[in-house]
Image (cartoon, rainbow, N blue to C red):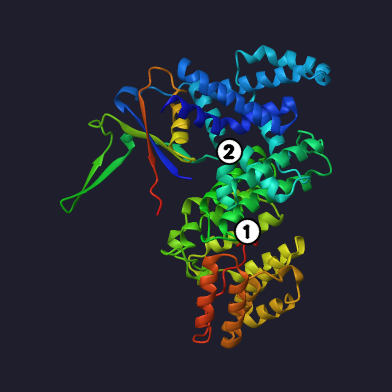
Amino acid sequence: MPRYLTLIRIDEQKDQDKAPSPELMERMGKLLEEITKAGVMLDTAGLRPTAEGTRVTWADGKLSYTDGPFTETKEVIGGYSLIQAKDKAEALEWTKRFLELHEDHWTITAEVREIAEP
Amino acid sequence: MSAPQAVETVYRIESPRIIAAVARIVRDVGLAEELAQDALVAALEQWPESGVPDRPGAWLTATAKHRAIDLVRRRETYARKLAEVGRELTDTVHDPEPADPEDIDDDLLRLVFTACHPVLSAEARIALTLRLLGGLTTAEIARAFLVPEPTVAQRIVRAKRALARAGVPFEVPYGADREARLSSVLEVIYLIFNEGYSATAGDDLLRPGLCEDALRLARVLAGLMPKEPEVHGLAALLELQASRTAARTGPGGEPVLLADQDRSRWSGLLVRRGFAALEKAGTGPYSLQAAIAAHHARAATYEDTDWAAIATLYGRLAHLAPSPVVELNRAVAVSMADGPAAGLALVDALAAEPALAGYHLLPSVRGDLLLRLGRGPEARAEFTRAADLTRNARERALLLERARTAGESAGRQAGEPAPGSGD
């Protein structure tokens, strides 16, 4: 059964002042419980804003550090989930359910990537 | 995603819950599955035209329930019962509201306990559980167990009939037999895992797919029964066992003994999940085996293994659930803690054990201990005997190789403890 890492990308510039509504949080909680009870969810979390993050880059044999916020990036990773599903179709179905919980004003991209198994 | 594919994916995710909800109405899991499949057929016909509904799972459940109610209505014997059930359900059939999650969980648990009912043979319980709760097709189950598909199909049909004939109620046991019934459920999941973890026959040492199916069932059960320590014990055991999968076979698919495994290839994620489940575990046999597995997971190298603690845990397990296999594993742990002679004394006490008469791991362990005692020729005979007894081609090759080298070198490593023993 393949595992999938889903990277949740959000537009931090556009959505930074938007805290998720209590209703959205409740819907998310319910879905999380459902995915967990289905034996599918292995791990999931949201990330702190990029303002608190730092990028460390290795290029031309040198390290460079860039403190957040990463304003030049349109979409930043706001969270992730690690699931184990029978196939990609099942992973996409759960992803669809997660995205549909959100109100219309959100712009979110969920990137579903299979974990490379040795 | 194409509509038919979307339908099938949704069905696979939802089918256990659909079957469970329908079974509560018709009180027959075989019939419930047929009605659930009818709903799937209806979706395959309608969705490509009408589009996939907003809540496809609810649509499928409502459709299946609707058919169930129609069916119950047509059965005169159910007339009175139906008056109660029908009224309360018809109102919601056309406008499905999400059912109370608690109710769905209860229905699912009923389905678990019914599929694993002791009135069925272990084989039947396994097939029915994988089918109804694991969402596997008959073909997938047949492939996993290396048996012809018609055999599995028949097994499932007979199991459904047996449940109906025995009048097994569709309920979660809360009475005196609850513990025995729960044991039956845990055993089914454990057997599925074990078949994947150390295949009893065939060319592959392990079939990770089956391990994953069992692990998923264990995780589902832990979600449904969060207050049962032994359920968490089983989940912990399987998470920890599964964490070693990648390291248990070499590049050519050959088995790699615990002593030789590259521990950096153990899955840290599964180890952590195993520890988390172990915190909620209890003192029953699966919890004890999980505690043993945890000692292996904690040891950064084979040499770091706390064999004394493991031997103690096997002692408790032998006291709680005595079995020759547990005793054999206790012998291995004792041999590592107190030396091979102490282990050999325990193994020799098992020599006349009829339950181990055809069990290849008895001579395999004995050969290992003899080798560590420097008794090469005797060890060679034991390894050869073990090779004759195993039905797994990979294991046979390994044992023959050990027999070949037994005369040449002094032994160093303990054999991989037997499956079904916390290791």
Decide: is B233 above or below B387: above
* Secondary element at tag 1: helix
Residue B222 visible? The answer is no
Question: Mark 1 sits on what residue?
Answer: B291
Front residue of B157 and A111: B157
Residue A74 lies, in percent from the top left, at 26, 29
Residue A57 visible? The answer is yes
Residue B302 lies, in percent from the top left, at 51, 70
Decide: is B131 above or below B143: above
Q: Residue at 70%, 45% (x, y): give it.
A: B125
Q: Quarter of the image holding residue B361?
A: bottom right
Q: Residue at 62%, 58% (x, y): give it.
A: B291
Q: Quarter of the image holding residue B197?
A: bottom right
Whether labels 2 and 1 belong to a single chain: the reply is yes
Question: Mark 2 sits on what residue?
Answer: B135
Residue A62 lies, in percent from the top left, at 18, 52
